[in-house]
Amino acid sequence: MKLYNLKNHNEEVNFLQAVKMGLGDNQGLFFPTELPIIPKYALKELIEMDFLTRSVKIISMFIGNEIEIHDLTKYVHNAFAFSGPIIVPVTKNISCCELFHGPTLAFKDFGARFMAQIISHFNDKNDKFTILTATSGDTGAAVAHAFYKLKNVKVVILYPKGKISKLQEALFCTLGENITSIAIEGSFDECQTLVKQAFNDKQLKIKTGLNSANSINISRLLAQVCYYFEAYALIPDIKRKNLVISIPCGNFGNLTAGLLSKSMGLPIKSFIAATNVNDTVPRFLKTGIWNPYNSISTISNAMDISRPNNWPRVEELFRRKQWSLNELGFGNVSDCVTIETLLTLNHMGYVSEPHAAVAYKLLQEQLKENEFGLFLGTAHPAKFKHLVDSILNTNLKLPKALEEPSKLPILSYDMKPSFEKLKKFLIS
Ligand SMILES: *Cc1c(COP(=O)(O)O)cnc(C)c1O
């Protein structure tokens, strides 16, 4: 597989290099040189396969023979060794595609666990890595668990202090061993900037074997492409014809993966890019002007991102496929409306959480008569227990994956959003 740097098309790397480097020159994202296409006649057969078999096929369509099929099969099986997507009907023409049945109860498990498998592929060659990642809530846990106790790998996770839920924090800040967490006194965007600065520091990069497990890493996106195919496979034939998928967006990795699945030939009619009030992309789609404001804290905290990393990939895909950005649905939802929506969903018998509720709200508003809609359930409601309990006046039961860590002490360091401080920390 060849990929080029979106900021410098002359820089070309293969898949393993792209995974290892994360970003190219000048912080450019890597993008596939060739976009695989599934012939119509082959689609039916692909859809009929089981999730794991199909996922190996899909990923190998991108990466070719760079990893032997035997190894790739092992990696996919190890990575996706948990319950895949589940489709739960909510109304007559809308279902939730729940992606949160993995070990850390968010869709990020798919990408993070697959990436950890690819990193372990290098590991056999004794390369050393420092995985430096910024999290707005759920990446931290998925990455920490995926890389926990992996040899030759040190994980450092930055998160905005006090801006993620207590249970999200407990999931990755209580592990110890090779996992270090740092509570940054600032916003997620500031955490993300620190990661980028670290990547720009050649000395630091070489000294620590720096890598990022953010969705800038192409391996995460390829893993995510797989569950769109599974979602399609799980819905009844008659509902597949005019399928609209609404995605709660933060860094826009999930949307990028969905669009990649469509570009391969998965018949998805359209997507809705749903955000909270951190609406840089919806405003851009409306006005054509890219004007990020400072990010604002909301109850859908994993989406509190005003400078979404993956957006250049979305634009590149539209350009390459000659699609029009006008075909992309979009919108933003305030906290107030998110709360109302959670109550409405609860009335209909579906307990949700703020991120999925944002996606549902816009889907319900924009879905047409003859269409069928899926909104992505990106995290388990119990991850936001305090909030969801108080809104729905209920008492959610904590799944085991949350109950145990919630009793352990938080091991995080506190740090000002200063690159010098972070650099010192990483080198020491
Ligand atoms: C990460 C996350 C998102 C945003 O996903 P992106 O791929 O960054 O757009 C949405 N919801 C939840 C619960 C998340 O953890």
Image: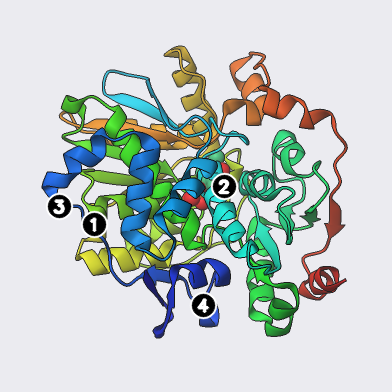
The CA span between labels 2 and 1 is 34 Å
Say which quarter of the image contains residue 51.
top left
In this view, the mark in front (4 or 3):
3
Q: Are marks 4 and 1 in contact (CB under 8 Å)?
A: no
Viewport quadrant of the C terminus: bottom right
The CA span between labels 4 and 1 is 29 Å
Looking at the rendered structure, the secondary structure element under dot 4 is loop
Amino acid type, callout 3: Pro
Amino acid type, callout 4: Gly
Looking at the rendered structure, the secondary structure element under dot 1 is helix
Residue visible at 47% across and 71% down in the picture: 29
Q: Which residue is mark 4?
A: 24
Label 4 environment density (alpha carbons within 10 Å; few <14, some 14–19, many ≥20)? many
The CA span between labels 4 and 2 is 22 Å
Residue 227 image point, x, y percent: 39, 40
Amino acid type, callout 2: Arg
Above-or-below relation of 148 to 386: below
In this view, the mark in front (4 or 1):
4
Viewport quadrant of the N terminus: bottom left
Q: Which residue is mark 1?
A: 326
Residue 6 image point, x, y percent: 41, 76
| Name of the residue lying farthest toward the left | 41
The CA span between labels 4 and 3 is 32 Å
Say which quarter of the image contains residue 402.
top right
Label 4 residue near ligand 1, CB within 8 Å: no
Q: Are marks 4 and 2 in contact (CB under 8 Å)?
A: no
Residue placed most toward the observer, 304 or 158: 158
Circle number at residue 113: 2
Q: Which residue is mark 3?
A: 39
Label 1 environment density (alpha carbons within 10 Å; few <14, some 14–19, many ≥20)? few
The numbered mark, 4 or 1, whose residue comes first in the sequence reads 4
